[in-house]
Amino acid sequence: MGPMRAAEAFLKELQETSLLRRVSRVQIDLYGSLALTGLGHQTDIALLMGLQGETPDQIDTNTVASKLASIRESKRLALNGDHPIPFSEATDLVMHRRAVKGMHPNTMRFTAFTDDDPNTPALDATFLSIGGGFIHREGQTGTAHQKCSSKVPYPFTSANEVLQLCEQHQISINELALRNELTFRSREEIRTGLQRIWTVMQECVEKGCQTEGILPGGLEVERRAPALYQSLTQRSAPMDRDALCVLDWVDLYALAVNEENAAGGRVVTAPTNGAAGIIPAVLHYLQRFCPDVTDETIERFLLTAAVIGSLYKRNASISGAEVGCQGEVGVACSMAAGALTDALGGTPHQVEEAAEIGMEHNLGLTCDPIKGLVQVPCIERNAMGAVKAINASRLALRGDGKHFVSLDRVIRVMKRTGADMSARYKETSRGGLAVNISEC
């Protein structure tokens, strides 16, 4: 997501500076985690598609393989879709795998050259991939969050401020989010956008349940969702008396999404691709197993999840390369736990408690993907995170919202834990499971 968005931004700069049609060569340099796990995460493919003008939400994923093959066979790339230039991954996509002190762990640099002076860059731009598809252009000041906060009626920077605003105005967290969103778009536009997100999540689960085979990348990991789906749909009545059968369905939803992610399918970044299965799994649980769920319930869930996710993004990180998997699966678990609690009628204090529980018990979670692929342990980890989110919500709903550790405090602890964590355990595939496959 991040690299493709960065390629899109670079193309825009080339257009704005009237350089696009003059470009004769483009070089991309990847650093840190992007270089170490880039091939496993399909960063190279995302960059090539992005430079051709594709975007994550519009690209036809069924055409990626043929487009990639065409680039590699011809050694030519159609910049922005209609300006062909020579392109060889061996020389034009450089992966710097050694850490550079002081550099963000997800750094990429785009450099464009023209025939006027083939050895001098006509334009270069460095982007940081800060998690969840969000990017930051090096040298720019201010963030989207800061710009939006200055316009909305209920600005907040902490969970405590959210709770104070809810109490002061006697509104729920999802209502607070909705009123802020109304600053930028109409209520109908918001509903349409939220329902589109939900639709893509449902389509992803459905495709994941129907698509059999081996996931790409060399680990020979077999898709498990189709067999599990067949098993669950063919169960006899006596087996369904198992009270924990619901968890099998939650596992299925999470596995289906993350197997699609591992195969390069379309997922909703929630808050990242590596943790994309948790929120859809909990939403499917809400829709199928909880009473009186409507489209509005789904929308409330997503609005609340967005509030919680924004707190992590602003005050800590949602990047596995910065803080480990606690910033991906941990944040997704926290978002889902709080959102489910709100959707089920919980108070703002119960929502805050559920979100805190969801993170507290993911603190220190490492990011150590085997072979750099988003498969092991990532796929199962989403299933575990979804189940944990549901349990966190149930714990909070059985209480009155009073608890010992606040969400703000656990977010600060998560950030410090990530800073203390060895780089080996932060999406580099140089520690943990990634280097101890035979021991697992």
Image: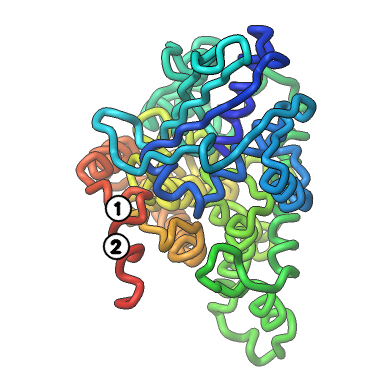
> Nearest the camera: 20 or 246?
20
Q: Mark 1 and mark 2: span between their CA atoms?
A: 7 Å
> Nearest the camera: 166 or 387?
387
Q: Where is residue 139 in the image (x, y as percent from the top left)?
A: 42, 13
> Nearest the camera: 408 or 139?
139
Residue type beneath disc 1:
Tyr
> Nearest the camera: 430 or 388?
430
Q: Which colour scheme is used?
A: rainbow
Q: Position of residue 333 (x, y in %)?
A: 46, 52
Q: Where is residue 106 in the image (x, y as percent from the top left)?
A: 41, 36
The answer to whether residue 214 is above or below residue 275 is: below
What is the secondary structure assignment of the residue under circle 1?
A: helix
For the view shown, which residue lies furthest in the top direction?
Answer: 17
| Residue at 50 percent of width and 57 percent of height | 374
Disc sitting over residue 88 in the figure: none
Q: Are marks 1 and 2 in contact (CB under 8 Å)?
A: yes
| Residue at 51 percent of width and 37 percent of height | 91
The answer to whether residue 296 is above or below residue 358 is: above
Query: In the figure, residue 251 lies in which quadrant?
Result: bottom right
Decide which of tag 1 and tag 2 comes sooner along the chain: 1
For the view shown, which residue lies furthest in the left direction?
Answer: 420
Query: In the figure, residue 197 lies in which quadrant?
Result: top right
Disc sitting over residue 425 in the figure: 1
Rate crowding at label 1 as few (under 14), some (14 to 19) or many (20 or more) other CA atoms within 10 Å. Answer: many
Give the position of the C terminus as an image quadrant.
Answer: bottom left
Residue linked to disc 2 = 432
| Residue at 74 percent of width and 46 percent of height | 70
Residue type beneath disc 2:
Gly
Q: Position of residue 73 (x, y in %)?
A: 70, 48
Res 186 seen here: yes
Q: Is residue 234 toward the left or the right of residue 137 in the image?
A: right
The answer to whether residue 15 is above or below residue 283 is: above
